[in-house]
Amino acid sequence: MSVQELETLAGAFRDDRDERLDSGAHPTLSVMLADADPLARRMVCAALQDEPDLAVVAEASDSCEALELARRLHPTVAVVEAALPDATGAELVRRLTAAVPLTKIAVLSVDADEDIALEALRAGAIACLTKDIQPGALPQLVRTVARGDPVIPPPLLPLLLELIRQMPDAGWRPVRSRLTTREWEIVELLEKGASTEEIAAGLVVSISTVYSHVKSLMRKLGVHSRPEVAAVARSLRREETAVPEAAHLAQPVVRPMRM
């Protein structure tokens, strides 16, 4: 597909979306497919074509084409095959996440392979789908992914729960937090009982900088001593990280169904 054709397609989609918004209709959710198998792409397109709020705006047969299309069209949802000729699904997920961070990504694989699914989720995918799902279930799956709700194969849930149980209280940080990365580094050293001098040496900063960070931590956490910093930060870590993870797992999941 030429650059001019891509730009024409992007403009047509924007015009259609604007018309729907002006008329009060639900905005169209744009979908990009990345799969080397043309038959698989055709089946997904057929499953979505009669849905008024869904539109397949691009099809790619490899990761390079998928990245180019995604950068130009910014689809709402990208459905990515787990084994493309020039990249794994996880590799493409990482590139798409960096290039179009607002696009929600679902990885499609032949079966619920634990390694493939976990690697894709770590890379930034929000859903792992299997190719034996009923075509009639695809429209709702796409809507679920577009909302930002995860879709996890049921066989994978016990493994995810076990991984969460094995996570240590220390040594990992929330993605979004009231504390900065540097403050979490100091918290981890405080939890190990490090002195001011040891923290300064470990982080290669001055002692006065350590004092400044500890003072900031006490103010943010509303405490007055270093042991309290460690204790309250431990609770904050669980609040900011463990609870959101559990909430994601509580979202509805889709059981694989035979076609």
Image (cartoon, grey):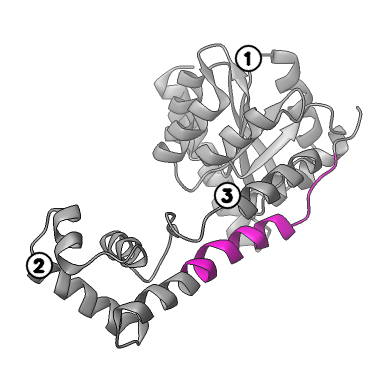
- Disc 2 or 3, which lies upstream in sequence? 3
Where is residue 130, by image quadrant? top right
Q: CA distance from mark 2 to mark 3?
A: 57 Å
Q: Nearer the viewer, mark 1 or mark 3?
A: 1
Name the foreground residue: 114 vs 65: 114
- Disc 1 or 2, which lies upstream in sequence? 1
> Element type at marker 1?
loop
Residue that carries the numbered disc 2 in the rendered image: 207
> Element type at marker 2?
helix
Looking at the rendered structure, the kind of residue marked 1 is Ala
Q: Name the main secondary structure of what is drawn in magenta.
A: helix
Name the foreground residue: 114 vs 17: 114
- Disc 1 or 3, which lies upstream in sequence? 3
Sort mark 1 into few (<14), some (14-19) or many (20+) by Cα contacts within 10 Å.
Answer: some
Please state the horizontal and vertical placement of residue 50, each as a whole percent of the image.
80, 38
Residue 251 magenta-drawn? yes
Magenta residues span 237-255
Q: Is 37 located above or below residue 180 in the figure? A: above
